[in-house]
């Protein structure tokens, strides 16, 4: 940045000072976040996943896994930035709540399916990913192009710091409670699922939007 400032940017001292201040705030925030993650955030997630997996009734870990997936996305900072940008770009046509609900449902479903894969060792990761991405590719022909771009972008946004720490630790804790489960494969398999499911749910949302728009257009034409 200093080299670019000298050769290309050539910002005024006041503007450059603001830029450096922003970098400092970002560094401090990231440092505090990583300290919190390493000190307790991941440990709590691992303990919750491990203890729930040892319960006789496995329904609890399925329900809590889904709820944690939904809650984590609602707490993901990048998700709120994305939904705000989508609403601004579409001039309010695509509302933030619709995107949030679709993203939350997708990530909650991804965590739920990951827990099922731990509980049922015969279910492999490719059993989810292969049909999942085939569905994603198929939906591209039905969903509007805007939603296709949003969906694939949201897949990366959903795997942010909250998901990659707390939910990852939760799944690894659950996997550690079963002899047949692999902590590494099951943990990072969940990340792959979280990256895939929002692509499907948001493209389905776009398909619904396009169907509603056509119906509304037909009604107005009849009138």
Image (tube, helix red, strand yellow):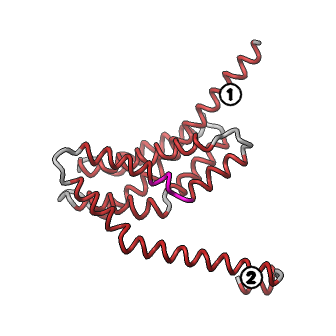
Task: Assign the C terminus to one quadrant of the image.
Answer: top right
The secondary structure that most of the magenta stretch takes on is: helix
Give residue 183's quadrant in the image. Answer: bottom left
Q: Residue at coordinates 73% horizontally, 78% vertically from top-left?
A: 18
- Residue 130, percent from left and from top: 42, 46
Q: Which residue is mark 2?
A: 17
Q: Is the residue 70 above or below the residue 217 in the image?
A: below
**In the figure, is residue 143 to the left or right of 119?**
right
Q: Which residue is mark 1?
A: 213
- Residue 165, percent from left and from top: 41, 64
- Residue 200, percent from left and from top: 51, 42
In the rendered structure, which disc, 2 or 1, sits on the residue that comes first in sequence? 2
Which secondary structure, mark 1?
Answer: helix
Q: Label 2 neighbourhood size at 10 Å, few (<14), some (14-19), many (20+)?
A: few
Q: Which stretch appears magenta?
A: 72-77
Residue 197 belongs to the span the image colors magenta: no
Could you give the CA–CA distance between mark 2 and mark 1, rounded to whole angstroms?
48 Å
Task: Assign the N terminus to one quadrant of the image.
Answer: bottom right
Give residue 46's quadrant in the image. Answer: bottom left
Q: Are marks 2 and 1 in contact (CB under 8 Å)?
A: no
Q: Is the residue 98 above or below the residue 184 in the image?
A: above
Q: Residue at coordinates 18% horizontally, 50% vertically from top-left?
A: 55
The number of callouts visible is: 2
Q: Please tell me the numbered disc located at residue 101.
A: none
Nearest to viewer (mark 2 / mark 1): 2
Residue 74 belongs to the span the image colors magenta: yes
Q: Residue at coordinates 71% horizontally, 18% vertically from top-left?
A: 218
């Amino acid at each position: 940045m200093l080299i670019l400032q000298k050769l290309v940017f050539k910002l005024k001292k006041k503007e450059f000072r603001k830029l450096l201040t922003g970098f400092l705030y970002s560094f401090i925030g990231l440092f505090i976040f990583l300290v919190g993650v390493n000190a307790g955030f991941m440990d709590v997630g691992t303990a919750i996943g491990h203890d729930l997996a040892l319960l006789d009734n496995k329904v609890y870990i399925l329900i809590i896994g889904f709820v944690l997936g939904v809650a984590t996305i609602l707490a993901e900072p990048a998700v709120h930035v994305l939904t705000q940008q989508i609403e601004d770009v579409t001039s309010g046509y695509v509302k933030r709540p619709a995107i949030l609900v679709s993203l939350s449902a997708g990530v909650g479903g991804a965590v739920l399916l990951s827990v099922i894969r731990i509980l049922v060792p015969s279910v492999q990761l490719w059993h989810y990913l292969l049909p999942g991405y085939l569905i994603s590719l198929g939906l591209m022909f039905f969903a509007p192009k805007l939603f296709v771009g949003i969906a694939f972008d949201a897949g990366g946004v959903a795997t942010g710091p909250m998901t990659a720490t707390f939910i990852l630790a939760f799944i690894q804790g659950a996997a550690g409670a079963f002899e047949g489960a692999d902590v590494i494969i099951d943990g990072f398999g969940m990340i792959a699922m979280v990256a895939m499911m929002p692509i499907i749910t948001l493209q389905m949302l776009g398909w619904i939007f396009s169907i509603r728009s056509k119906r509304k257009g037909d009604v107005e034409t009849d009138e």
